[in-house]
Image (cartoon, rainbow, N blue to C red):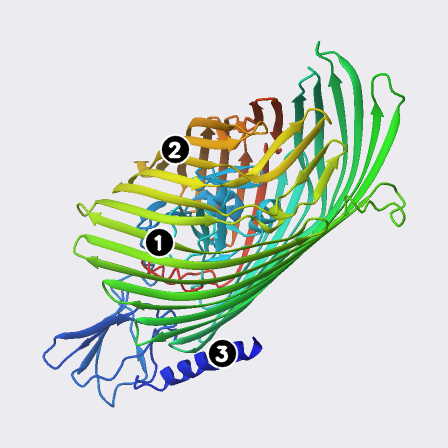
Amino acid sequence: MVRIVIYIFMLLMSLVLQAQTTGAEIIRKVVDSKQEGLAFVTVIAKDDEGNVVVSFYTDEQGNYQLNPQNNIKQLEFSYVGFQTKRAAYDASLPRVIQLSEDSSLLDEVHITAKKPIIKREIDRLVFHVQNTPLATTNAWDIVKQTPGVNTIGDNLSIRGSQSILVTINDKKVMLTGEQLKSLLEGTEGTQVEAIEVITNPPAKYEAQGNAVLNIRLKKNNSYGYKGSVSERFKQTAYAYNTVSTQHSYTGEKINVSGSYSFGNGNTVRYNEDNVRYENGERWSSVMTRRNKMKGRHSFQSEMDVKLDSTLTFTIGGNGYINEQTKGDYVIPTLIYNPQDIVESSYTTFNKKRANMDTYTGYFMLDKTFNGDEKLVWSSYFTYDNQKDNQDVLTKLNFKEQEPAERFFATKDRQRTRLAVSGIDYSVDKESSKWELGGKYSLVSATYLLNFFDGKEREVNQNQEKSNAFDYQEINWAGYTSYTKQWGKWQVKAGVRGEYTGIQTQSTGMGSHNQSYFKLFPTAYLKYDLTDQQQLSLAYSKRIDRPSYSWMNPAKSYYNLFSYFQGDPDLKAAISHNFSLNYTFNELNVELFYNRELNPSMEISYQENESHMLIYHYTNIDKRQLAGMIVNYSYQILPVWSANSFLYLQQQEDYFYGVDQNLHKNDAFIVGGRLNTTVDLDKKSNWKAMLTYNFYTPSVQGSFKISGYQSTDFIMSRDFNKSRWSVNLYVYNIFGSDRQIISTKYANQNNYFKDYSDTQGFAIGIKCNLGNQKVKYNTKELDMQEKNRL
């Protein structure tokens, strides 16, 4: 295997070196009077009769390279704010062309192409956050306000599904839930350029997940050093504080960036469980999960080395460390008789300690051939380690029984390693684009659960309830995609093939093997009705593979009467997604239909004989949904704008219950988001935003989920010529996002109330360092795949 990797590496390097020896001319440069490179200068090459032979832009450092052509006699350099310059294309052409500023214009010229906040592209919805108060918060707050994304607590969902592939600059993020939230909270909003919601991902993306949520971070476009230090204090029921800093340096050949954030404080979540059993008893538990965070560290670094104008090498890494989450929970449970009178009770004392760390390292080689061909070789490795210990003491006070105490403890260890390597090749012409690529990935996960029936762990380990679980997965994937534009038409089609092999080994349950090969076609068709109106169709086939931990059959106990259990035989779910889009200026309307076979999800069921409440991951029979999404942005006054998002969906989940009958759980869901922004003072960038979110009741498997609503207020302002900025975020003003999740069919009758303590406020202050002046904000260019991993 090592020899194969070395051989591939040597082959790729030989291709790169061979490409560098082609007949391209030496690298030349366009600069201003300060000898600083000018990015995106228009260069027009003409023949001796003045006809245009070819035109192109300089790169971000002002460099350009032109293949020798006998019919080129003159070059013309033009840039807004500078005088146009012409030079003969011969041996006398200098390596550095200096442009002079046009004295008839302002001393400083800022070129801006203002983007709509919400933009519909052929295969995705793009939410731009520049020039809004959201840009002064953090990446998590921005994601929560993204059209089409629903957040409850630490969980993200799109169209009712939590099966989402989260990427940052197209790099897969291994974190989920609370860890993902913490990472994004440590990412400053000023780093975020846009959020892309891709409900029908093209073939070059992994087929995993019903949707892709890509967080696009900005690249530094000011030369020299640039940095910031920020402080954010958040107060809900308890306080949480985050300190972060980011730094970057942009030079002629090397770009270096890095960021770090540290957070600590307390969080809390409130739950109430109620179960009504067949004998008429009702068991009711109230739990306040207050967690004290000793320290959460998020960090990243990246370096781009421009070996020449066509070859860039990138190396970087990121990590997340949770030193310790400390929770001491007291959970009283009252047992009511059929007449709803308390007859018995028990109290659970849970002492929980958890910590984790995860690290990712990556590198990328980006080579451009002949201006329109690109080869990208990228690899990354992720290591994840988690520890979770709990001591559980239960004091029993049952009717007609002597008071008693029961104790158990668990020690849980999880370690996951992921290695990925892939090659992408593309040919990007003026009216067409062809893409081809392949990827190999290897996952190795180990889960070790030790269960103890007494406080003396060395002699009281319960072998029957302890478990060791190993998971191995390999995945080979290849794809091709073609895009063509002619006249008012644009078509994009592709197919991705993936082979997956899975092997699991568990104590007491032996080994389980799965292997399968699937094809995943994608297709898009777009037609420009007029300059302002577009109509498009899209289709994609997707797969949702169960998470590694969901396949672990070990019973993870919450208390004496409740546990979680996975299923090593979980199947991968297949979904078919269709959409029809209509765009008219700032109005976008989407009709969609999704059908998913064997979706996997967490559901709960009660055992009436043992009074046990069990949570487990399982496959339900199918899910289908159809609906409409409407986005509209409008300018009410020059200083007052608004954006609206409306969501209508009919959802049907079919599942086999504990009675072995097929049940249907459905709901017609109405949701939306309205935000309005007011420019209070443009000189100081003083803005205010009010946001309202709402969703009617929905379903998930056997669950019925109540609706919710929330109202947020955001205000931001700059000081001292934007060297300082301050923002205020008031969360969930009316505290109205509490939910009830219930199950009621056959002999199942239970519900729980959930509230994640979202009502409060946050105050942030940021100090900008170094060169903050952006000399040129260019029109939007298609660079989104530059950093793909």
Picture residue at 70% right of the left edge, 22% below the top: 284
* Pair 2/1: label in front: 1
On the image, numbered disc 1 is attached to which residue? 521
Relative image position of residue 500 (x, y in whole percent): 50, 58
The image quarter in which residue 503 lies: bottom right
Relative image position of residue 723 (x, y in whole percent): 51, 54
Looking at the rendered structure, the secondary structure element under dot 3 is: helix
Q: Is residue 98 left or right of residue 691?
A: left
Looking at the rendered structure, the secondary structure element under dot 2 is: strand
| Image: 479 above or below 145 | below
Label 1 is placed on what type of residue?
A: Pro
Residue placed most toward the observer, 472 or 301: 472
On the image, numbered disc 2 is attached to which residue? 647
Inter-mark Cα distance, 2 to 3:
48 Å
| Image: 30 above or below 623 | below
On the image, numbered disc 3 is attached to which residue? 9
Q: Is residue 116 left or right of residue 313?
A: left
